[in-house]
Image (spheres, coloured by chain):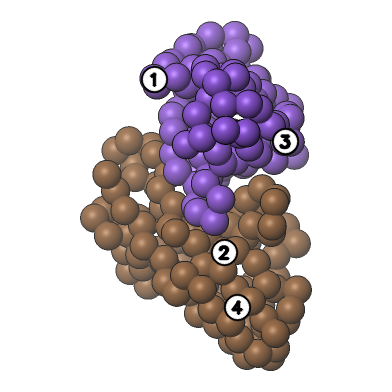
Amino acid sequence: GAVVSQHPSRVICKSGTSVKIECRSLDFQATTMFWYRQFPKQSLMLMATSNEGSKATYEQGVEKDKFLINHASLTLSTLTVTSAHPEDSSFYICSARQWSSGELFFGEGSRLTVL
Amino acid sequence: GQQVMQIPQYQHVQEGEDFTTYCNSSTTLSNIQWYKQRPGGHPVFLIQLVKSGEVKKQKRLTFQFGEAKKNSSLHITATQTTDVGTYFCAGPRGAQKLVFGQGTRLTINP
């Protein structure tokens, strides 16, 4: 089946630094990818919709200047957490929809810890 | 806005017992999807239901979509330790987005 790869799987950074997370669709083209955040023992909360070649659309309450999303190609979307703070520590998961099946494939997730 | 409510939040069963999680939407859904997330892992697609009253089975898992297309359920018969994880339902919001329920965390006593 289709595969979505996410990197890095774990990252620890100091407060104030920026972290970039990559999401790749390995065997299909994804014009749209989604970024979710999941806090421990909670559900997935949609952060933004990443559109290839255009600006991402953010959900209400998500700071677009803090969570920069770039979707430069049909197989790659990146999420950059700028000036990270401890409260940004979370599990970030990307997903991409394979339009032929409608199925949504998730990346393995990236666990961010901000010290 | 659209909400997808899922109950129970937690369920602990003895191995071999059955398990059911329920999902309710505040609005009619064009489809509903179910995902499983193992501890420490990422969500994995299980199934999509589209038709009113639809019932689909995957081995010991039975998925139902309500007649009004506002509720759904996942039933596992004779649970096994490999069934441990959190089960999420998800409904579409708009043309592309997916809204997830809160999930039901299943733990099993072997």
Reading the chain from its start, which is encountered first: label 2 or label 4?
Answer: 4
Mark drawn on residue B4: none
**Does residue B58 sit above or below A8 in this rendering?**
above
Q: Which chain is purple?
A: B
Question: Which chain is disc 3 placed on?
Answer: B
* Circle 1 residue: B59
Judged left or right of residue B96, residue A45 is right
Q: Nearer the viewer, residue B16 or B69?
A: B16
In x, y percent, where is residue A63? 70, 71
The type of residue carrying mark 2 is Tyr
| Res. B51 visible in picture | no
Q: Nearer the viewer, residue B86 or A98?
A: B86
> Do the residues bearing badges 2 and 4 touch, measured as CB atoms within 8 Å?
yes
User: What SS does tag 1 mark?
Assistant: loop
- Colour assigned to chain A in the rendering is brown
Mark drawn on residue B10: 3
In x, y percent, where is residue B26? 73, 27
Q: Nearer the viewer, mark 4 or mark 1?
A: 1
* Circle 2 residue: A92
Residue drawn at x 53%, y 25% is B79
> Do the residues bearing badges 2 and 3 touch, measured as CB atoms within 8 Å?
no
The type of residue carrying mark 4 is Val
Q: Nearer the viewer, mark 1 or mark 2?
A: 1
Classify mark 3: residues with Cα within 10 Å, few (<14), some (14-19) or many (20+). few
Same subunit: marks 1 and 3:
yes
Classify mark 1: residues with Cα within 10 Å, few (<14), some (14-19) or many (20+). few
* Circle 4 residue: A81
Quarter where residue B92 is shown: top right
Classify mark 4: residues with Cα within 10 Å, few (<14), some (14-19) or many (20+). many
What is the C-alpha distance between the residues marked 4 and 1?
41 Å
